[in-house]
Structures are given as structure tokens and as C-alpha cells.
Amino acid sequence: MTTSAPRGTRFVPLSYRLYRAAFALAFVLVLMLVGLGSGGYGPVKVLGGPTGTAVAWAEKQMGITAHPAHRPAKRPAKTPVKRAAHRTKGSRP
Amino acid sequence: VTHGSTTAHVVVDIIGGVVGLGVLTALCLLFFSLISVYGGRLSVAGPAPDRGGGQKDPAWPSYLRRQHKLDFAAACRSSIRLYDKAFKRWWAKFPLFIITWPVLACAGIFLSALIAVFYLTQLAVWIVADVSYWLTAGAVRLADTTYAQVRRAQASCPVCYEVMDRPAYKCVGCGALHRDIRAGRLGSVYRACACGRRLPCGVLRAAWQLDAACQRCGARMHRGAAVLRDVRVPVFGEPQAGKTRLIYAGFYDIAGRANAHGWEACFPDESSQARADSGIRQIISGQRTAQTGWPLEPALTCQIGRGTKGALLHAFDAAGDRFRRADGHDELRYFEDGHTLVFVVDPFTVPGLRRVIAAQPRTDLINEYLPAHPRNPDDAYGEVVSRLLSSGTRTREQRLAVVVSRADVLLATGITPPNGSERIRGWLYDNGLHNVVLAAGREFKDVRYFAVASVDGTQAPQPYAPAAPFIWALSTRGFNLLDAPADPVQAAVPVKEPVA
């Protein structure tokens, strides 16, 4: 007996749904693991931050340690402190 | 480009941005494809047969056999189609293509890489799932095979007499026949019928949950066939030797004994129940049993016990005239697959006994049972067994019960049949059936001799119980009627009390 469902049938056996979910989930997990393994933030990096990752990688390859905009802000110069006039000689270290 | 200059940073950031957008685009394309394929309809019809023609049953093959490849191919096709379409969008036209084309070019490279990763992931999951699948299927199959061998379980069609390892099973949803319900390509624990109904895999479970049908003729078979012990008892002998009466009386006696020992006994199909009701009614009322007609009837089946401890006892009856004619014998296929053959001997046709009875003063009883032109039982035995041997039946693997019927009538004429197989054997030997006795011992694996009174078992003179040959046939197949089940049950479907 060779009954066959019409092409593109709506009915999908439960086992097919479960297997499909398993295959898709496995792929997403692999991508997440790749993201984690590359030293980033896993799914955030994979799904949201590839641009930043690529930029950082390219900068590193070209020997540019940091973009001016990425550099930490310089500490403000210390204001010179006037020596107190009343300091006595004996107080110096 | 000078390291550390602002221009270099701008160039690098642009390149990085293009690459990053390409990665994002590739991910989006693949995820859209996966969602549309894996969350949607099937790309190809499911329950169609395999190309090799190995699949006959109208069921969906396991996802791991075929559909996973089709889904993967469909996802790849879908993502490539989306990728192609992207070049035709408005944002891929002049002048934006200066940005979008490099992005799409990067996306194409990453899409290929992602598809490769997806393929490797699929392969790894498929290997793990397939190994688990076949381990499970192997365990289910092993359980089926081991059970069938240990319990000697087979299925026999009561209509066409075909004997098979497993029957076909009907889907409870659409009625389609599944001819090979074993665990395999269509499922390891369950299978999905073409109509979508979930069916159990393996004979051990299907036998109780699905309606069985004959593989050859499609006739309905008994619930539990191929799991219950199957005991097949063909009965033969001269016309009016008492074959049919022996079957009814014997089965009625067996049902009574089974119930007394805590077994559930019933006639599991309508045909058997109707014929048993009629036949037992004649036994109870003391009427003579009507002569069996030429057309073959389905086997008379009695089920004793239920579940895996039960047994199906089939008795095959045919008109005595069939054993005299070659054309009548051709249809008696059940002899080849019978476990214990029952040869019924009318004591009034045994030469030595006939002479003794004929010498007595004539009474109504003697006139009724003493045939005017008797035929030696030797002839019937010789005709049946020679045809069996010539057809290639291995009678050395079968057992034979030689049953002297009408012990009650013999007692009434003053002749007391002996008790015990060896004594009956000697008694028949001395009275002219030496050919049968000698040939039977040579041609069959085991031969037992019985003398029975085919009357109501409760009134049968001891030790001439009509159930004796059938109880022996059951015991040779490992079913001992006297071994009550551990948890005795009251008969849920009791043998119908005959109407007086």
C-alpha cells in the first residue's frame, strides 16, 4: 500500500516536530558555544555585537591598540599646591 | 595609512562595520529560513514508500531516515533564495549598493560558513539520535523475537489456516493494514500511520491494542494472536467416527475445567461462539451431532487464560468424506501446520471389537451404532498420513493422539475400554489395528492413545473425559491446564451456558 500525503501537507507527526526542534536547538546551542569560546559574551556577542567584535579584532590585527575615542580619559592635571607659608622647618620629612 | 592616525581608524571601522553587518545579515537570512522550514509544513509528503520499495506499510518513516535531509536541503535553498532576492531590493540599487554590496558579499561568505556549521551540527545530532533510535528498536525487536521463541507464539488464521509469525494490524483510525508492525524504519517505539494515528511498534504491544488480520486473506484474527500460545489440533478419521462431537464435548469439558482451576476460558470469535453454543447444546441434551458438511469451516477456537500466560486452542474439523477423495484433501492445509493430530477411531469399525459386538444379541443401541458396511480405520489413517508425507510434511515433528470415541456406548454394550495409553494401544493392536499402531509409532514424534466418551464432561464416565486429548495437546506446547494462574480471575467472558 502506497498512500501518500499531498505535497506540502499540513499534518506533521509529533515525532517530526520534536526532531526538528532538537536539530534547530542544537544549532543555536552550537552558535552560542562558538560565541562563548571566542571570548565574548555568548549569545549577546553572536546576535548583537558582531560589528564591535569585528572592529576590535581588526584594530588588534593592525597594531592599533586603541581608538582615540576608546582610550580612557586622562586624569586631570593636578593643581599645584602652594606650599604653606607657615610650614616650619622641622615638619619637612 | 599611518598606524595610530585617525584616517586608519576610520578605514578600519568602516571595514569592521561592513563585516559585522555581513555577519548579521547572514545570521538573519539563515534564521528566517530555519524558522520557515523547521516551523512550517513538510517540504515533501511523508508517508510515501521508499525508493527501494522496501516499505509497504502506510506509515510515516522516521524523521531520521529521510525527512531530516529534506529539511536541511529546504533550509539551504530557502536561505540562498533570500540571499538572491536581497540583491534586487531598493537598498541594493545605485547609489546605496556602494555600501550594501560589500555587506552582502561578506554575508554570502558567512552564510556559507554558517550552513557548514549547521550541516556539521545536524550530522552530530543525527549520529547520536540514530544510534539511540536503533538501540531502542533493537531492544523492542529482541523482546518480540525472544518472546516468540520462548513461548512458541505464532498466529494462525482460522479461515485460510495460514500460519504466520505475526499478523497484520489495522490502524484504529483509518483501518489501513500494517503488515510489519515490528520496530524498524517506521518507528522504534511508536509509528505514525498515514492518517496520523500513533500506533505501537512491536507485536507484544500491538497484539493487545490493535485488531489483527491475516497476512494472506485479510480475515480478522483473534486478539492476542502471536502472543498467546497457539495450539493447533487437526482432527481426522472416518465419516461418523465422532470427530465433531469429540471437539464440542472436549472443548466444553476444557472450558469447565479451566474455570474450575481459575483460568478464564471463552470462545473468542463469533463463529466459534455460535458453533460451540449449538454443539454444546446437543451434547448436553444428548442429541446426536449433525454430520459435518463438505464445505470447510473456520477453526473452532477456545481461548484459555489471558495476557502472556494464555493460549489459543484451535480445532480443525472436516467432513470424513474429504479424507476419502483426493480433491477434498487438497484444501486441508492445516494438517501441515498442526502440532498434535487427532485420529478418531470409531470402536464399532475396529475389526476385533466389531466381531464381538456383532456376536451379541441385537439391541437398538447396537443397531444404531454398528455400521452395515464399515471401513477399516487403517484406510483413513493411511490415506491422510501418506498424503501428508508425500506433500513434504514432517510428521516426525508432529504428535498424534489416537482417540477411541464412544466409550460410553461401548460400556453400554458390555465392553469396557482399557484405561491408560499403553493399555489402549495394546487393546487396539490385538483387535486388528496393528498396522495403525505400528505405523503411528514410526511416523510421528509421539503417539498417545485415549478412550473418550463424548458427552457432557461432568457426566462422562471416568476416566473417559473428552478433554483428555486436548489437555495433552496443550501440555505438549508448554501450557498446563492444571497450573492455575498466580492471580486467579473469574471468567470475564464465561462460556455460555447452553440453552436446554
Image (spheres, coloured by chain):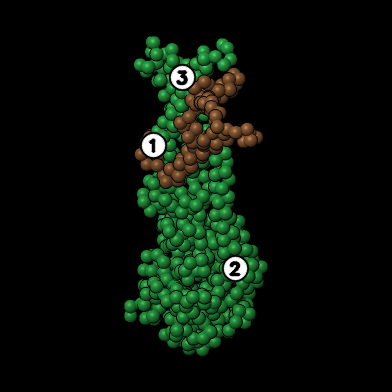
Q: Residue under mark 2: which chain is it in?
A: B
Work out whether mark 2 precedes mark 1 in sequence or the reverse, and give the earlier one: 1
Q: Does mark 1 fall on the same chain as mark 2?
A: yes
Q: Is residue B245 visible?
A: no
| Image quadrant where one finds the N terminus of chain A | top left
Neighbours of disc 1 within 10 Å: few (<14), some (14-19), many (20+): some
Residue located at (39% from left, 72% from top): B493
Of B9 and B286, the residue lying toward us: B9
What residue did someone put label 3 on?
B104
User: Which tint is chain A?
Assistant: brown
Neighbours of disc 3 within 10 Å: few (<14), some (14-19), many (20+): many
B224 lies above or below B103:
below
CA gap, disc 1 and disc 3: 27 Å
Q: Is residue B20 visible?
A: yes
Work out whether mark 3 precedes mark 2 in sequence or the reverse, and give the earlier one: 3
The quarter of the picture where residue B397 lies is bottom right
Residue B43, x across and y down, in percent: 42, 33
Q: Residue under mark 3: which chain is it in?
A: B
Residue B438, x across and y down, in percent: 65, 71
Give SS at disc 2: strand
User: Tags 2 and 1 in contact by the CB under 8 Å rule?
Assistant: no
Residue located at (58% from left, 84% from top): B418
- Could you tell me the amino acid type at mark 1? Gly
What residue did someone put label 2 on?
B399
Neighbours of disc 2 within 10 Å: few (<14), some (14-19), many (20+): many
Give SS at disc 1: loop
